[in-house]
Structures are given as C-alpha cells and as structure tokens.
Amino acid sequence: MQVSSELEESRDSISQTLRWMSHGPQPQVLSYNGYIINGYRFFTKKRDDSSSVQNSGVLVMAKTMQVSSSKDKNPIVSDMSFFGVIQEIWELDYVITKVVIFKCDWVESKNGVKEEDGFTLVDLKKIGHKSEPFILASQAKQVFYVEDGLNTSWSVVIANSKIDFCGPVADHDLEDTILLDRTLVMKDYPEVESLDVIDDDTCLRTDVEGTWIDND
C-alpha cells in the first residue's frame, strides 16, 4: 500500500527507505530468542521449552476472502484470526532501516481451530499455511495455550494483556528470564512483500519497532 501510494504521486517521490528495501536485506540475519513489542514480551518456542512460562503463542488478524462454496460468486472480505507459535525471531537489515519478523508454525485453520462453549480451541499439532510462516513483529498479538482437560489434543486460547514496556525494563521483570545471546546466521529469504502492515501504536526505538531482550 505504501509503495502504491507513492507511485501514484510520482516515481521521484519514492522515499529513500523504500528504495533501499527494494534491493533486499543484508545476507546476515540477527536471530533472537526474545523481543518486546506492542506491549508484549515474546519468546521463541525453544526458549519457552526451557522456561516455566509461555510467551511464544501468537495471534495475527488478517483480512481474507471467504466463500461459502466453490460456486460462490459473491465472496466477502472479512477479518480472520490465525493462531501460531513463534519458532524464530529475525532482524532483517536494509541498511537504512531494520525490520523484525517472526517465523511461526501456524495452526491449520479449517480442521485445527474450533469454537466451543464460548471458547476458541486449537490443535497445535495440525500445522498449516506452511508457505506463509512469516509476519511482521508489529502485527503480532500474544496468546496463551492451555491444554483442554477433557481432550488433551486441543488447547484453549487465552488472550494476554498488554504491559507498559515503554520505559526501561526493570530488573525484576527479567528475574525469571534467562536468554541466550543473539546469534548471527545466514538465511535464504522468503517473499515478504505482503508483510506491509505496521502498527503505529507501539513503543518505538529509532532503529527497530521494539526492544531486544539480552543478558546484557
């Protein structure tokens, strides 16, 4: 949308940021275990597995075209919730700007999500949307998954409340948090042109949208 709006004005009006991004990111990627954005503290699933808390559950709202059948000639566009688990957190470096993305395992929407007694339940073992694992960190909302006591194949989705992380993170906030240092890795990049939704209502640093969590 940003590219389209600038092209409608004039090719000369394209911002420096978009010009740099059109060349693609640097081949080296910083990979993190934790990241604070949108009032949430996110961790990767690997980090969660060594912790007593859960911070890798993620929800993203997206507009999708929905049809009642293959013969439906009047599809509607509506909001749809996608539930997932963060596997990796990457920082893409475009020289003039940096973009943080989450690589997630997404629950298959058709058979892996259901509504029951006013609750949303997901089957985390039913993975779908494998060709589209990435979202912008700025798009993410946080959820917890609580195993259903009656059917352990399903987990109840519970939304997490936002916390004010705009100021410095106090020591007591991290007393139960042990994070590995960031790592430099080489990655083959996916197509990410569709990841263009930026949440302006966040705590921003000058270089990235959120705050990295490190041992330091």
Image: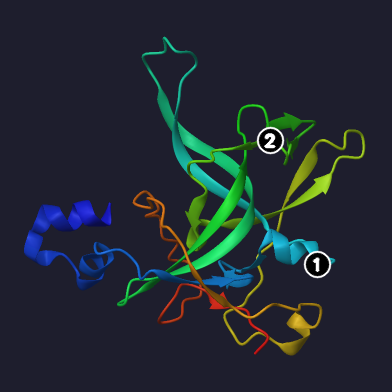
Residue 49, image x and y in percent?
79, 61
Residue 107 versus residue 159 in the image, above or below:
above
* Pointer 1 or 2: first along the chain: 1
Secondary structure, mark 1, is loop
CA–CA distance between discs 1 and 2? 23 Å
Residue 168 versus residue 23 in the image, above or below:
below
Using the image as rendered, state which of residue 44 and residue 169 is in the foreground.
44
Which residue is identified by label 2?
A: 126
Residue 52, image x and y in percent?
85, 66
Using the image as rendered, state which of residue 182 and residue 14 is in the foreground.
182
Q: Amino acid at mark 2?
A: Lys
Label at residue 50: 1
Q: Tell me which residue sits at (78%, 85%) in the image.
A: 172
Sort mark 2 into few (<14), some (14-19) or many (20+) by Cα contacts within 10 Å.
some
Q: Amino acid at mark 1?
A: Ser
Q: How many marks?
A: 2
Residue 30, image x and y in percent?
50, 73
Q: Tell me which residue sits at (46%, 62%) in the image.
A: 187
- Quadrant the C terminus occupies: bottom right
Q: How is the image coloured?
A: rainbow
